[in-house]
């Protein structure tokens, strides 16, 4: 049975969450933990579908618990929704997201809001689980096909060591003067019917393509050697076989050409294996392409869901709060007792803060500026947010340029640049961040540069082995829009990351 885990040191909060889950998610088993350490142990053992996590707890706080769960392979894919009164503070929200939380809900919360967040997290997890399962199936399929091919190759090598080949000789006219008897087993023909009667063009079926001479015929005409020329033959009962033919010209003591000698090998087993392998590789490539398309569609679905939630927050919650603020403001100048005025002012301040917080949440989920004004204004807004929140100097060049790619791919570039900026904030200790945009005849170039601590470049296998995203995720996203990514960094000298996208995607 699928499970929902709640981690909170408050029994009252746990009972409230249990009632919500019982009301809307009766098919899920609700399990609870009253401390961070216990929550980690239960999550590792029970592998719940989602975790509802409080921040303020006595032993390990929510941020520490979140970081530990996201660092463990067995629990890294479980969505975590942080629920705390600290959610009204944008710095705390940012801290939670950096720790690995998938979303944040402020206390007190509405049941519909919590339900919406849980539904989104469950949908995303279901899609991610499906993608992981398909990736695992693909890996098993490739491994199985590779083993089958290696076994086929081994069998072929064993057969080749004991295979029988036949030898032949032809005269100036191309008629056979000698053929070893093994040909009767290979081609199911009578040697006596071939000697002096059959031309090499007919036996090897080289005269079926009019106007186009084979390599064997060209070598015969130019009296030059040939090696491993493969021909496909149709013999009795329409059976097809493949021969590898090698030959060399023969001259008499006076250096006069008088024919050819050669050898034929039956390579049918190898060709069948090659054809099967080619078909398998083609099927694998097709499957990989489908997986990439699925990954792209999954990302777009996620972004559409983010935008839908953001619009709902703006249209419902934001407008409701604004209307409440306006109505409250309309009576603020009325004659009330001092304590009533104080309460009205406090409520007004809380509403104003809630409006600002809902606006920030809307922009975090899906910045409207990206859809209304475009990609470069969204970059500019992102840099302004970084400057305001972190005190880092930011510079944007090329802001008058228009990046005209498909609208659905704008979000890819925005998320990629946002991820690069977040990496700088988290790891680089930079005081200056620059975004430069320019284009050539065929490409757009978006460069993100910082003056931070830098690092020793290692875009290596570890990211893939550990299942991490980061730079690997950027590369995969760009691959879906036929772009590519490069990064240059030196310890102590900062980092330059360049995203390249073709104009043809416009």
Image (cartoon, grey):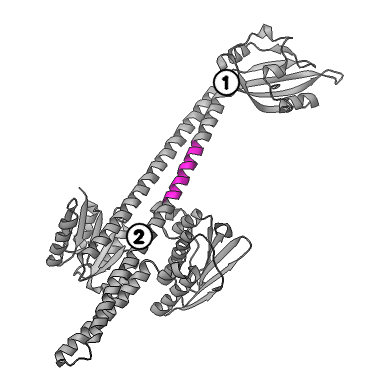
Q: Is residue 198 shown left or right of residue 43?
A: right
Judged from this view, the residue extending furthest toward the top is: 192
Residue 240: numbered disc? 1
Please report the residue visible at 23 percent of the width from the left and 56 percent of the height from the top. Answer: 43
Whether residue 94 is visible, yes or no, is no
Q: Secondary structure at mark 1?
A: strand
Q: Position of residue 160 (x, y in %)?
A: 56, 23
Mark 1 neighbour density, 10 Å: few (under 14) some (14–19) many (20 or more): few
Give the answer, above or below, for where 47 lies relative to 313. Answer: above
Please report the residue visible at 58 percent of the width from the left and 60 percent of the height from the top. Answer: 503
Pick the quarter of the image with the C terminus.
Answer: bottom right
Please report the residue visible at 36 percent of the width from the left and 69 percent of the height from the top. Answer: 364
Find the magenta span and give its range: 280-294
Q: Nearer the viewer, residue 157 or 413?
A: 413
Mark 2 neighbour density, 10 Å: few (under 14) some (14–19) many (20 or more): some
Q: Nearer the viewer, residue 420 or 115?
A: 115
Task: Decide whether the magenta segment is chiefly helix, strand or loop.
Answer: helix
Q: Is residue 402 shown left or right of residue 211?
A: left
Q: Secondary structure at mark 2?
A: helix
Q: Nearer the viewer, residue 500 or 485?
A: 500
Labels 2 and 1: the sequence-earlier one = 1
Residue 135: numbered disc? none
Q: Is residue 160 shown left or right of residue 466?
A: right
Say which residue label 2 marks.
305
Q: Position of residue 234 (x, y in %)?
A: 60, 19
Q: Nearer the viewer, mark 2 or mark 1?
A: 2
Please report the residue visible at 44 percent of the width from the left and 67 percent of the height from the top. Answer: 371
Whether residue 326 is visible, yes or no, is yes
Question: Does the magenta portion include 278?
Answer: no
- Label 2 vs label 1: CA separation? 56 Å
């Amino acid at each position: 049975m699928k499970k929902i885990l709640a981690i909170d040191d408050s029994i009252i909060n746990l009972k409230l969450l249990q009632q919500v889950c019982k009301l809307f998610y009766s098919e899920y088993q609700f399990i609870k933990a009253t401390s961070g350490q216990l929550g980690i142990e239960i999550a590792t053992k029970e592998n719940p579908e989602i975790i509802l996590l409080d921040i303020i707890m006595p032993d390990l706080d929510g941020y520490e618990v979140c970081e530990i769960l996201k660092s463990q392979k067995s629990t890294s894919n479980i969505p975590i929704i942080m629920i705390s009164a600290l959610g009204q503070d944008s710095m705390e929200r940012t801290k939670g997201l950096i720790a690995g939380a998938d979303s944040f809900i402020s206390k007190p919360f509405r049941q519909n809001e919590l339900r919406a967040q849980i539904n989104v997290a469950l949908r995303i997890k279901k899609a991610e689980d499906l993608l992981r399962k398909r990736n695992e199936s693909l890996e098993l399929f490739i491994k199985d096909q590779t083993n089958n091919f290696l076994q086929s190759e081994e069998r072929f090598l064993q057969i080749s060591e004991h295979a029988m080949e036949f030898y032949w000789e032809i005269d100036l006219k191309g008629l056979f003067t000698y053929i070893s008897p093994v040909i009767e087993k290979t081609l199911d023909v009578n040697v006596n019917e071939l000697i002096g009667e059959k031309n090499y063009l007919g036996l090897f079926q080289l005269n079926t393509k009019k106007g186009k001479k084979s390599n064997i015929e060209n070598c015969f005409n130019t009296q030059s050697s040939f090696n491993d020329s493969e021909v496909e033959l149709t013999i009795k009962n329409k059976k097809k076989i493949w021969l590898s033919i090698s030959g060399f010209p023969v001259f008499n003591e006076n250096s006069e050409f008088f024919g050819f000698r050669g050898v034929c090998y039956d390579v049918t087993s190898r060709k069948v294996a090659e054809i099967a392998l080619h078909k398998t590789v083609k099927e694998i490539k097709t499957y990989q392409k489908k997986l990439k398309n699925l990954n792209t569609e999954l990302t777009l679905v996620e972004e559409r869901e983010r935008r839908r939630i953001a619009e709902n927050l703006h249209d419902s919650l934001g407008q409701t709060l604004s209307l409440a603020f306006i109505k409250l403001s309309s009576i603020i100048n009325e004659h009330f007792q001092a304590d009533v005025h104080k309460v009205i002012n406090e409520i007004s301040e809380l509403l104003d803060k809630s409006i600002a917080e809902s606006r920030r949440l809307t922009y975090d989920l899906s910045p409207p500026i990206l859809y209304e004004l475009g990609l470069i204004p969204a970059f500019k807004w992102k840099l302004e947010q970084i400057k305001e929140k972190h005190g880092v100097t930011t510079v944007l060049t090329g802001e008058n340029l228009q990046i005209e790619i498909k609208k659905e791919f704008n979000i890819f570039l925005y998320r990629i640049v946002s991820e690069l900026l977040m990496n700088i904030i988290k790891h680089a200790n930079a005081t200056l961040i620059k975004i430069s945009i320019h284009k050539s005849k065929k490409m757009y170039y978006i460069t993100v540069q910082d003056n931070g601590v830098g690092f020793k470049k290692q875009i290596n296998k570890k990211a893939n082995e550990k299942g991490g995203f980061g730079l690997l995720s950027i590369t995969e996203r760009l691959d879906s829009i036929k772009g590519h990514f490069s990064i240059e960094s030196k310890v102590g000298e900062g980092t330059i990351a360049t995203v390249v996208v073709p104009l043809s995607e416009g």
